[in-house]
Image: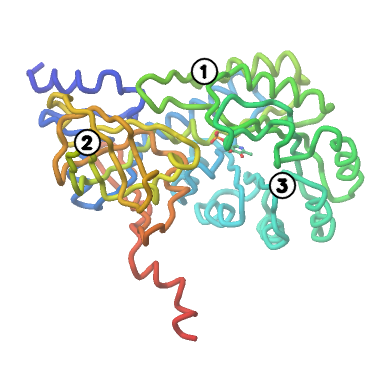
Amino acid sequence: MTANAAAATASLDGMRDILPEHAEVDELGELRIGGVGVSRLAAEYGTPLHIIDEAGLRAQIRRFVDGLRRRWTNSEVLYASKSFPIVEMYRVAAEEGASIDVAGGGEIVLALKAGVDPKRIHFHGNAKTTDELRLALDTGVGTIIIDNFDEIDRLEALLTGPQHVLIRLIPGVEAETHASQATGGVRSKFGFPIEQAVAAIERISAHPLMELDGVHVHIGSQILNVDQFAQAVDSISRSGTFRTYDIGGGLGVKYTYDEVAPSVEEYLDRVVEAAAAHLPADARLVIEPGRSIVARAGVTLYRVVSVKRSGRDFVAVDGGMADQLDIALTGQRYEAVLANRMTEPWDEEVQIVGRQCESGDLLVEDARMPAPAVDDLVALATTGAYSYSMTNNYNGALRPAIVFVQEGEARLVARRETYEDLLRLHEPVQEA
Ligand SMILES: Cc1ncc(COP(=O)(O)O)c(C=O)c1O
């Protein structure tokens, strides 16, 4: 091994778990993902840019689908598409054996565009509108997860044929996560409180066209203690005997060097152990991972716009909270690397800030890296989930492009937004 190659390998140590599976550092000290160097990607597609390691992503979906099936034959993995609702992502998830969880009409449309079999779509939401329910029924969406009595009213008015449904219950499990990501506590806005469950189940069961398959719970997101999923299984088992028990998603991932996250295997072992203890042996067991499927496969590539050396060293990049909102929203922390100079000494501690007009627009509080300069490339790691899906146009920011990379090839799966795209929404106003 040459000295450069050794330095390259060493520079990856400690961050293997937060960079994509197919990340490496080349002889020139540049980060490559899926065999493609970041400089080439930045030159061809611009920045900010979402880069997805396609082989790593596919392998992770398989870990869930095959891993669950090995442990519990009658099972189904729904990819929670809110984490990364991209046409190509729906296609990849379906190809690798996952069904799809959607949380709105737009996600139904995207999944259908990808060619997903509508029967494999599960429609969630605590405020599904009549139009969205009509869209779901017209397009043959397989399962609707009923959240409240008003939704039962709406479905009663709309149904003209049989419809599979699940009922969402509040499990009363307080998830150990950021308050905004906990959804299963007794005061949750999602699902029926346990004391209303019997009445709701009776109403749904009495309807000639609603086919009640079973029950659903979801305790929250970015949960690192797998015992909490066992609690969810225990809780859902108390709601009665059904064909299907859907315990939602929520498995957390490792974002920072010091964080420890359970593996998919550890998660599945714990869930299935609880299922074996509490659920009927012939029941269908459903899980809905989103974040843990896609987070690690993605990085966001930015270009350094300015380096301000004052009391603190501010490194400002060409993106920010418009493409990475969850930092401000949920306090999510990330790590960043200087992607074009990985093997130089990491002897500076800098603050990576965004370009939006908010002091809270901070990407990494204390990033250790070689002294960054204007035009260097910064890669924010583990951004595959809830980054692009929360992208917004704050300060007139344009949505980044997305590329999938694999075996030295890159393919554009979503183009960068343009100023024309921004203006298009205002055309009716301009014409008036
Ligand atoms: C009903 C439901 N299922 C699944 C998920 C996916 O959660 P995660 O991405 O944390 O796995 C969510 C997200 O909050 C959800 O609301």
Give me the residue at 72% from left, 47% from top: 144
Q: Mark 3 points at which residue?
A: 144
For marks 2 and 1 on the same chain, the one whose residue lies earlier in the sequence: 1
Give the Cα distance between marks 3 and 1: 29 Å
Look at discs 2 and 3 and give the one toward the viewer: 2
Badge 2 or badge 3: first in the primary sequence: 3
Which residue sits at x=24%, y=23%? Answer: 12
Which mark's residue is nearer the viewer, 2 or 1? 2
Q: How far apart are marks 2 and 1 (CA)?
A: 46 Å
Q: Residue 119, how many percent across, how many down?
A: 66, 47
Q: What residue type is labelled 2?
A: Gly
Amino acid on which disc 1 is placed:
Glu
Question: Where does label 2 land, which residue?
Answer: 311
Question: Mark 2 near mark 3, Cβ–Cβ under 8 Å?
Answer: no
Circle 3 packing at 10 Å, graded few (<14), some (14-19), many (20+), is many
Nearer to me, 6 or 47: 47
- The answer to whether mark 3 and mark 1 are in CB contact below 8 A is no
Q: Is mark 3 within 8 Å of ligand 1?
A: no
State ligand 1's quadrant: top right
Callout 3: helix, strand or loop? strand
Relative to 360, 309 lies left or right? left
Q: Amino acid under label 3?
A: Ile
Left or right of 215 on screen, residue 51: left
Tell me the quarter of the picture where residue 258 sits: top left
What coloring was used for the rendering? Answer: rainbow
Q: Which residue is drawn at 71% across and 28% down?
A: 284
The furthest residue to the bottom: 432
Q: Which mark is residue 265?
A: 1
> Residue 281: x, y in percent?
75, 19
